[in-house]
Image: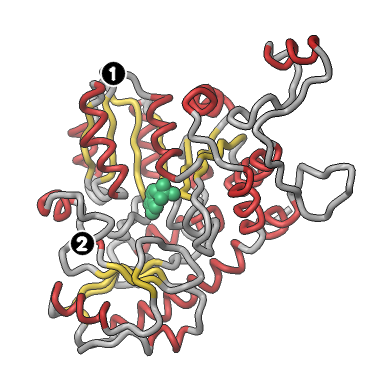
Amino acid sequence: MKFETLAIRLQTERSQHHEHCTPIYTTSSFVFDDAEHMRALFANEEQGNIYSRFTNPTVREFELKMAALEQGEDCIATSSGMAAIFATFASLLSSGDHLLMSRAVFGSTFRLNEDYFGKWGITYNYIDPLNNKQWEEVVNKNTKLLYLETPSNPGLDIIDLEKAAAFCKQHGILLVVDNCFATPYLQQPLLAGADISIHSATKYIDGQGRVLGGAIISNKYIIDKIYPFMKNAGPTLSPFNAWILSKSLETLAIRMDRHCSNALFIAEWLERQAKVKNVKYPFLASNEGFNIAKKQMKAGGGMIGFELNGGLEAGRKLIDSRRMMSLSANLGDTRTIITHPASSTHSKLRPEERAAAGISDGLIRLSVGLEHVEDIISDIRFS
Ligand SMILES: *Cc1c(COP(=O)(O)O)cnc(C)c1O
């Protein structure tokens, strides 16, 4: 089946009521038939649900859908995108290991490195997405994995996934890709050679700004290594959120098509405005990563970064002159959201850390929604 059909038709659960839509199994635990059944389930000799921190049917349906859509063997759903990232690192890294990360990663991912990994004896280096030579300089015999975001939040850096996968194979390390901005509809990292694809399902997967969630998609071997951490540490996705996210997947393709066409139209319009200094959008021919983006993405996504000639002050004015757009920290919503990374999502980074991550103080991030494109454009006013 094609992506759109799978996203709608993959259904694992149906109760004796023959409902059309999957029910929400809001139960913390499950009952056993008898002492022998209980023993067999705990001994892993028989498949079945024990406790919703371990498995839950509504959550499992979301996991199987995500695995199918990313063309992975299996998936673990998590309570948030950060829970997915943390569970992956906590399961696969040990003290003494070294980690490579693209220089521009999500603010909280960066903070995990800076505030926790060091004290647990995990070392790391940031890599320059466009300079493969520099990768060779920082990889060492203890390097266990390369973690990258493409397109990155908020800089919209594009990294060549096939090249990154070849580099990782050559050095015997795992390639982990945060696929949040692209979604499985626009980009499938595992097909390009990545070992693990990670999502903040909070963003485009939900797509309507309602729930937090995350997902880790990989092969069975890696998922089996991460699952015990999930089971014991407990950053589990709730059945209610899983249900919302499963329903959302049914409309992911059609939503992404509109996010992308609106965003491309607005990015091209912004480029023509005299007061705009530069525009970052993966499918703009003027962008550094354009050819790679064209190769590995179906379309450019819904996120735009731009800077005004007037810098930070002009950006603040533009934000405060909006009438419709939301000023919010989320992204990937039906509603267009404007934000200023340097004073919000990336404010916990020091100025020099922001600069190294390619986030200038004047950068405006636009998460282009599903409103009519003309209404969005008429809400972007330059003073
Ligand atoms: C939002 C985001 C995350 C974190 O996801 P949460 O669901 O907020 O925990 C991770 N990576 C990227 C690229 C994000 O945009």
Judged left or right of residue 293, residue 251 is right
x and y, in percent, of residue 87 in the image: 43, 32
Q: Residue furthest left?
A: 352
Residue at 27% across / 73% down in the picture? 279
The total of numbered circles placed on residues is 2
- Disc 2 crowd, CA 10 A, few/some/many (<14, 14-19, 20+): few
Judged left or right of residue 20, residue 248 is left
Residue at 25% across / 43% down in the picture? 132
Whether the residue under disc 2 has CB within 8 Å of ligand 1: no
x and y, in percent, of residue 269 in the image: 35, 84
Colouring: secondary structure
The secondary structure type at the circle numbered 1 is loop
User: What amino acid is found at the position of numbered circle 2 in the picture?
Assistant: Ser
Q: Residue 366: tell me if it is visible.
A: yes
x and y, in percent, of residue 325 in the image: 39, 78
The secondary structure type at the circle numbered 2 is helix
x and y, in percent, of residue 220 in the image: 59, 28
Judged left or right of residue 249, residue 322 is left
Residue at 25% across / 31% down in the picture? 116
Pick the front one: 97 or 237: 237
Give the label on residue 108, or none.
none
Q: Mark 1 points at which residue?
A: 95
Q: Name the residue under label 2.
A: 343
User: What amino acid is found at the position of numbered circle 1 in the picture?
Assistant: Ser
Mark 2 and mark 1 lie on one chain; the one further toward the N terminus is 1
Q: How far apart are marks 2 and 1 (CA)?
A: 34 Å
Q: Hey, which quadrant is residue 287 in on the image?
A: bottom left
Pick the front one: 88 or 379: 379
In the image, residue 8 sits, relative to residue 168, either above or below, namely below
In the image, residue 33 sits, relative to residue 162, either above or below, namely above
